[in-house]
Image (cartoon, helix red, strand yellow):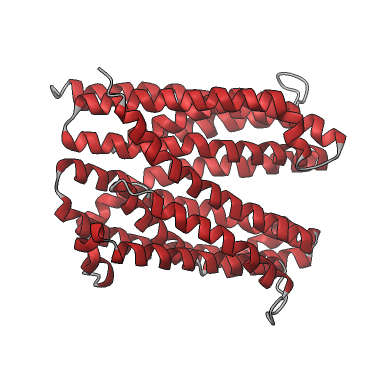
Amino acid sequence: MIQWKELKKLAKLALPVLIVNLTNVGMNCVDTIVAGQAGEVSLSAVAIGSSIYTPVALFAAGILMIIGPVISNMMGMNVKTRIGYFLNHGLWLAFALSLFVMPILWFVRPIIGMLSDNVDMVHMSEDYILAIMWGVPAFLGFVTLKSLNEGVNMTKPAMYVGIIGLLVNIPANFIFVFGLLGMPKMGAAGCGVATALIFWIEFLLIFIFVYRHPKHRSYRKHIVMWRRPTLSVVVKLIKLGIPVGISILCEVLLFCVASLVLAPLGVLQVASHQVAVNVSSLVFMLPLSVGLASSIRVAYHLGKKDRVGVKSAIILSYALVLVIAVITCIGIVLFRYDIALLYNDNPEIISLAGTLLLIGVFYQLSDCVQVVSTGVLRGFRDTVSISVITFISYWIVGFPICYVLARTNWIVPQMDAKGVWIGFICGLTVSAILLIIRVRKVYRRDLIDAGL
């Protein structure tokens, strides 16, 4: 029996998460647009700098994403007194991850010089990374407190904070990039400064909310008076979170490396691919939000030992995401050339980007299924399987197909960017199938076999 009221709870959780994700994508778009107005060198510098910063930062954020489902599980088990203790360890872990990420970003900066012989672009990229690096502690702190709110079914605060961050990010970019209001003209580095500033503003806003909200009153002492962490709890968090971070890293790196595969094939291939990727990234925010909501609801029902609730959350998550997939795919098929025209007016780029978006319809279907399956498995705390499956799907299956079809004549005549997207479809389809099989196995193991 399906509890249809679960659908309302899923949607109530997913919508604010969607808006938060869209604000994050929006900030990246603002950086790109403003940097582009500053010149091609600044635009290229932001692109290269962010391609280095993003995988490292998202890997660390992925580790912290397990906090939401764990806290939701505690809510279901009605052991709310342990939430503050657990939150304290999450903040310690965020701080430790900052000390891990920041040196990595510092030491990888010289590598940029190996990627290009444009001295100005190299220096700007290094300055961008150096600037945004100082926002890492705030970014990871924000992820931790956002996960707390998600775990207790309060997703709107992060939504409001995200909207404020996006609105402030627009003038901040212009101020630091072009040197307005007496500030020095920084170019690409200004985008990094603006983003780091927004991270700190968002962290302080959500910190104040958590500290002052009556629902979080029992956690205040765990936020402002950090206690010495228990090593075993931190290790448990890391063991649960690292597989999630690895799975995110595998996917992000696949798209980054795919761009490098196409780089020698010319501007047309790269630009068309970038347009299609950007559109797909925006659309992906919809199923991603459902996946995050599903992890929270599954974990909550598991804590209550409510088998019907778990089953309802899983089935309705898949149903909701498939409806979203059908609607978005129809929209892409009908308006793919109009969408591409929003990015560029070159007829060749519009034509190829439209073709890639059409191929991407199949990619979207697989991606929707795999992202919800990942969310469900996070709810079950079955995170190791996620990293194994994503690595196999993206790097053992997906990437080789991308390269062979795009750059060689081994199987069919060289397909350029279209070959990369067919590789995406293959990798994501394998991932979706394997993850569904894993969800069925974990469901039987943890519920049916346990007699629930």
Could you say which is closer to the camera, residue 335 or residue 422?
A: 335
Could you say which is closer to the camera, residue 369 or residue 428?
A: 369
Residue 186 can be seen, yes or no = yes
**In x, y percent, where is residue 34?**
72, 60
**In x, y percent, where is residue 367?**
52, 29
Left or right, 113 with respect to 18, comes to right
**In x, y percent, where is residue 268?**
82, 39
**Residue in view at x 47 percent, y 31 percent:** 392
Position of 392 relative to 235 (above/below): above
Left or right, 323 with respect to 347, comes to left
**In x, y percent, where is residue 144?**
36, 57
Position of 425 relative to 130 (above/below): above
Position of 77 relative to 228 (above/below): above
Could you say which is closer to the camera, residue 245 or residue 395?
A: 245
Q: Residue furthest bottom?
A: 182
Residue 87 falls in image quadrant:
bottom left
Can you say which quadrant of the picture contains the N terminus? top left
**Residue in view at x 39 percent, y 62 percent:** 206
Left or right, 81 with respect to 25, comes to left
Q: How many marks?
A: 0
